[in-house]
Image (tube, helix red, strand yellow):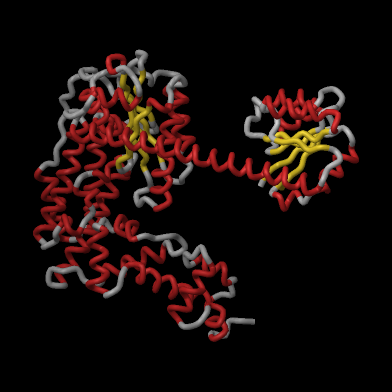
Amino acid sequence: MYKLMIVEDEPLIRMGLQKYLDWKELGFHEIVEAENGAEGVHTALKEKPDLVITDIRMPLMDGLEMIGSLRDTLPETLFVIWTGYNDFEYAREALRLGNVSAYLLKPLQYEESLRTIQNCVKQLEQKREQARLASAIQHNLVENMQLKRSRFLKQLLEDGGASADTGQLADLCGMNAADMQLQPFVLSYVPASVPSPQSRAWWRQSAEQLLTDLLQRMIPSIERQHLFCYSSHHKMYAFTVTDEEQAPYLMLPPLQQEAERLLRGAAVEPDVRLYFALGPVTSDLPTLSSLLHQADQAFFARFIQDGARAFELRPSGADPLRTALIQLGDKDKMQLLACLEQGETEQLEQLMRRLGQELQAKAGQIPMEQGLGFIQEVIATGIRYAGKHGINIEETYHQRLLYLRFVDDFDSMPALFEWLTGWMLQLRTDAGQAARNGGAPDTAVFDQIEAYILQHIDQEITLQMVADRFFYNPSYLSRLFKTKLNKNYVAFVTEIRIAYAKRCLVQSKVPMTDVAQMCGYASYKHFVKTFRKMTDTTPSDYRKQMGMMD
């Protein structure tokens, strides 16, 4: 659809031109007016019409002057002069100079006028198509460059810079290799303990833009084309390339305060927190790789700096010698095993709470690796218990547990150890079920899953969410549904939703559309279709059968 502007000093003629052709049929959804060239300039700059039809002789500013004033500012706009025979040479001169696309002679001839406007519409269509193709080409070029940069950064992180090519980096950012200054940044998000599909999708869609916006607020001179980004799990790794020396530490007041404010304001998803770390400037790619990996150590500081969101990677040797040690003693290991063996839930929770408090108390005095080692020892004790009871840890439980990736999911040590306690309790439950079922889990686990689904029945509940809640490997859980229940997870959830819908329909007179939403169906049409497939009747007919209709 296009916009038309008519510029004519005679009101009756302006009105007549609006009625002369079927402008909507020709593709013009809006018509604006101006009564002279001066007003035409003002209106055109505001409305940005696609086509302008103008007289030549008008007070204040004639049509040719108006076109001359607008053609550079509105290069995509087409101009058609409508003029009398006496001004015909002016119109022809305007055509030769490129000011106008066509002209119409007074008095207008309908067929000629229609053909002229139709030709203008074809030109507008061609311009739009050319613009669309140019935009698509540019978009592909940008995406291709971003992909190359992302791959470069991924390789840098994976091989530690051993195969990093400074020349390749220079080509990717169009700079002289000898002048490049590199500064690392990492943005991390901490979701709720059971990340929702919405929070994951929000992070995938928003992470790079969030980081870009944050950096541009902190470093106004930075240009987007000098930013390399790569996303992995809950982190967005990045570095900037500039040809001017930057200050090695940007996290200084008031920059620190501004970063904290931006990080808090950017997390629009509920129960999502953002954390940011930056390192010093370097010109060496292997050093850059090391600094990016050290961001994990900087993020570990959130467990001891209550409320802090932005952290600075300190240069090597900046920290005083740390002599504090922490390890899981034999006594604690034996007590942990005893609690698991004997099913002493309360004692287990107290022990895990104390271990978390001990780690938090020393977290500021030990390297991050030692803190992770302590957590790994706690997990290893659970693995020892699982092995004794015939549970295959790697097959059954999520890799985020085995490889400590779950640490990224928490912003406090108590929350982290509460989650670990939950795994220990689930481990105890699974071991008991395996013992009762000759070494294999029994169907009692599905009762737990059903209870969890009913607690969140009005929400989207994916297999991944259930796996996260019960610490399972999603593949293992999927196989469990097929081998034990002879159905997949989706069928299991659908049965629960429809059974719940039946109860809602019988026990209340809530409108059918509300029942659909209460059962987790955003689409009422989909709810009815699923209900009919499962019950051979519609929700309204079912309610009638149960005698619940007025």
Pick the quarter of the image with the C terminus. bottom right
Query: Height in image: 182 above or below 447?
Result: above
Q: Nearer the viewer, residue 133 or 546?
A: 133
In the image, taking residue 233 as reference, residue 38 lies left or right, namely right
User: Left or right of 530: which side holds 79?
Assistant: right
Vertical comparison of 528 with 301: above or below: below
Residue at (61%, 44%) from the top-left corner? 125
Would you place residue 449 above or below residue 296 in this image?
below
Foreground residue, 455 or 464? 464
Q: Residue at x 16, y 55 (%)?
A: 394
Where is residue 73, by image quadrant? top right
The quadrant holding residue 391 is: bottom left
Where does the image place residue 154, in percent across and percent down from the top left? 26, 36
Q: Residue 494 versus residue 238: which sits nearer the camera?
A: 238
How many badges with numbers are in the image? Answer: 0
Whether residue 414 is visible, yes or no, is no
Q: Evaluate whether residue 550 shows in this view.
A: yes
| Residue 13 on image: x %, y % | 88, 40
Instruction: Please name the residue shown 82% across and 23% down the image.
Output: 61
Q: Where is residue 67 shown, x and y percent of the image?
A: 73, 27
> What is the x, y in percent for residue 420?
25, 49
Horizontal placement of 154 versus 195: left or right?
left
Q: Residue at x 39, y 38 (%)?
A: 143
Horizontal side of residue 201 vs 542, given as left or right: left
Residue 6: name its quadrant. top right
Q: Choose between 41 and 310: the one closer to the eye.
A: 41
